[in-house]
Amino acid sequence: MIPFLDLKKINEPYEAGFRQKMDEILAKGWFILGDEVGAFEKKYAAYCGTKHCIGVANGLDALVLVLKSYIQIGKLQQGDEVIVPANTFIATILSVLEAGLVPVAAEPDMQTFNLDPKSAADKITAKTKAIIVVHLYGQIADMDAFSAMAKKYNLLLIEDAAQAHGARNNKGVKAGNLSDAAAFSFYPAKNLGALGDAGAITTNDTALAAMVSSLHNYGSEVKYQHDFAGTNSRLDEIQAAFLNIKLDGLDRDNAHRRKIAAIYSEGISNPKIILPFYEGDQSHVFHLYVIRTGNRDALQQFLSSQGISSQIHYPIAPHRQKALKEWHHLSFPITEKIHEEVLSLPISPVMTEEDAHFVVSVLNQY
Ligand SMILES: *Cc1c(COP(=O)(O)O)cnc(C)c1O
């Protein structure tokens, strides 16, 4: 059996380190906003190349806190429109709604699955004040085009980098440092995953960082003194400690993911399967390796019959979800086609090259 993702095996190399850290934390008895969170924020900011990093409870909160902080510092107002990709994990869209802003969806590019700058530009109105791009499946979006667009129309540019830890553009600049502010998730299955929920915001904007830092801790900088009606979305000391340990392995893990992806891209030659498009550099960290095919369910069943698990990211487009009834009348043909055809193959830092070659041979027999 080739599992889609083996979290137990992924964490195994770090277990001794985790146990030792856990003992230290228990001995110290400090669990919220202490040295471990501080150390992780410093280390992750340095890793991304940004001035600031603020740890938060999860990736959705990271997005919401960026938007609410922009509202609080006067750069966004309730009712402003925010352009989002029509094909993304629903959190991107829900964050805009939760902040009291208006999400406006635009089509992706069929080749890269990432938001298409031309489709996004078509959605700009006088009310548009921000764009959230998603580096979907781990591949950096067309940031040169989006930066130019943001400058031209005076829009905030925000990265949903929840799937792209460590991805870098052709100048070596990392995801999280390619926009005004970025949101990360450290959900266990992400490229950098905690042992539970966790997230972070990175930015070079000192005023924004200060507001996020306040809002994520009850709008308070000084204990029991509250300047804003904030929330509780803190990163735990324990998760921060584990992330500190795992961050050291991120580049190596991503390199292995790219190796598995290269085996797929070089080996799969079945004309019924469309391979993902990407540059051969480090702009893709393969959170997922996503192929397209006409009869997706049949292919998934065939793989399963040969002992290979696969998944669909995502089976239902956001504008078709029950949660977004107000979007049911909208039509996004490219997004719909992608949702009908995509299939994610197994890929992870612990998948063996042998297993990847087996997946290739099975796909070529289909
Ligand atoms: C995982 C993910 C999120 C949300 O992260 P959580 O930590 O689960 O809240 C947001 N956006 C994208 C694109 C994601 O993949």
Image: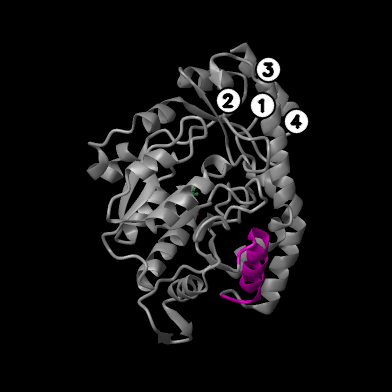
Is residue 271 visible to the viewer in this orientation of the structure? yes
Under circle 3, the secondary element is: helix
Q: Which mark is residue 264?
A: 1
Q: Earlier in the sequence, mark 1 or mark 4?
A: 1
Where is 353 relative to 297, above or below?
A: below
Is residue 87 visible to the viewer in this orientation of the structure? no
Residue 167 belongs to the span the image colors magenta = no
Under circle 1, the secondary element is: helix
Q: CA distance from mark 2 to mark 4?
A: 18 Å
Q: Nearer the viewer, residue 354 or 106?
A: 106
Q: Give neighbour class at mark 3: few <14, some 14-19, many 20+ (Cα, 10 Å).
A: some
| Front label number (3 vs 2) | 2
Q: Quadrant of the C terminus?
A: top right
Q: Which residues are magenta?
A: 33-50
For label 2, the residue is 275
Q: Position of residue 186 (x, y in %)?
A: 57, 55
Q: CA distance from mark 3 to mark 4?
A: 12 Å
Q: Give neighbour class at mark 1: few <14, some 14-19, many 20+ (Cα, 10 Å).
A: many
User: Could you tell me the amino acid type at mark 3?
Assistant: Ser
| Front label number (1 vs 2) | 2
Q: Earlier in the sequence, mark 2 or mark 4?
A: 2
Q: Nearer the viewer, residue 21 or 361?
A: 361
For label 4, the residue is 353
User: Could you tell me the amino acid type at mark 2?
Assistant: Leu
What residue is rendered at 66% in x and 39% in y?
Answer: 348
